[in-house]
Amino acid sequence: MKMSRKDFIAVGVGGFAAALSTKANAQLVEKPQDWSSTDLHKIMQRSARYKQVYDITQIGGGVFLNNIKNSLNGFQFSFGARPSDINIVAALHGAANVLNFEDAMWKKYPLGEFTKLKDPQTGEFAKRNLYYPSTADKSDRNPDSEKSIYQDKSIQGLAARGVSFFCCHTATEEQSRKLIARFGLKEKPETIVKDLLAHRIPGSTVVPAMVATVAILQLEGHFSYITLAA
């Protein structure tokens, strides 16, 4: 089926709804009929003066999370923006895509070993999502306090401040195949994909191809673009 650019945008340029079809889950490349753009459009069309997308492919010790925290604080405290005027998206794909998944998936699949990420508490490859949980003092509202919510660079803490975290379906498909090949897993790729996508961190939004979605955020959503050097 041929679609005009206008129709393509209307149908949904880039985002899955939380519930994905079985067909879509088993596909490396999604067709317009395989996904819904509802969640993406809600985020993309949210009224905000300052809109920024972070294009992240590497975990890199979580440095990008600190940068996002600094963006939030810069907009809010340096430029006087209201929190509702800030709309930041963390577009996670490549190796960073695994940060979209709950601890149960890190335990079930060797995601820590897969990404060579070690848990500082055990010295072993991580079996939990190290960058998700917040340890900030929620009662501390002093932006200069290192324990405050404003210096919290966890995914959970940033999400609480309105940051949206995107999960790449294509990256998940590719990673499932790499996990099978590397660790000799018995599951089929689509079985692992369904499992991972069903156990995402709260608020994670799935998009079919992050590299395309980032462009849509820039062109259609008017998000400014930023990435970090590897």
Image (tube, grey):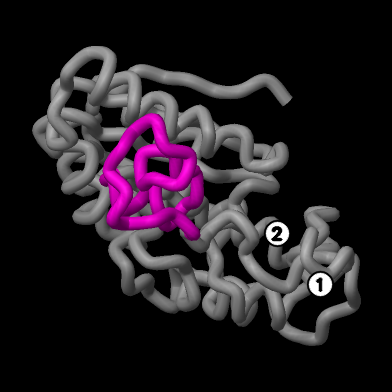
Badge 2: residue crowd in 10 Å (few <14, some 14–19, many ≥20): many
Distance between mark 1 and mark 2 Cα atoms? 9 Å
Magenta: main secondary structure: loop
Amino acid type at mark 2: Gln
Above or below, 173 against 198 in this view is: above
- Identify the image quadrant of the C terminus: top right
Name the residue located 63 percent from the left edge and 47 percent from the top edge.
96
Identify the residue under disc 2: 175
For residue 73, which numbered disc appears in the image? none
Residue 73 is left or right of residue 190, and the answer is: left
Task: Write the residue at 59% across / 55% down.
Answer: 131
**Residue bearing the label numbered 1:** 180
Q: In what element is the residue under mark 1?
A: helix
Image: 120 above or below 181 = above
Magenta residue check for 214: no
Residue 124 position within the rendered picture, expressed as x and y whole percent measured from the top left: 88, 67
What residue is rendered at 53% in x and 34% in y? 66
Location of residue 194 in the rendering, given as x and y in whole percent from the top left corner: 53, 77
Residue type at mark 1 is: Ile
* Residue nearest the observer in this picture, 179 or 147: 147
Q: Which residues are magenta?
A: 135-162
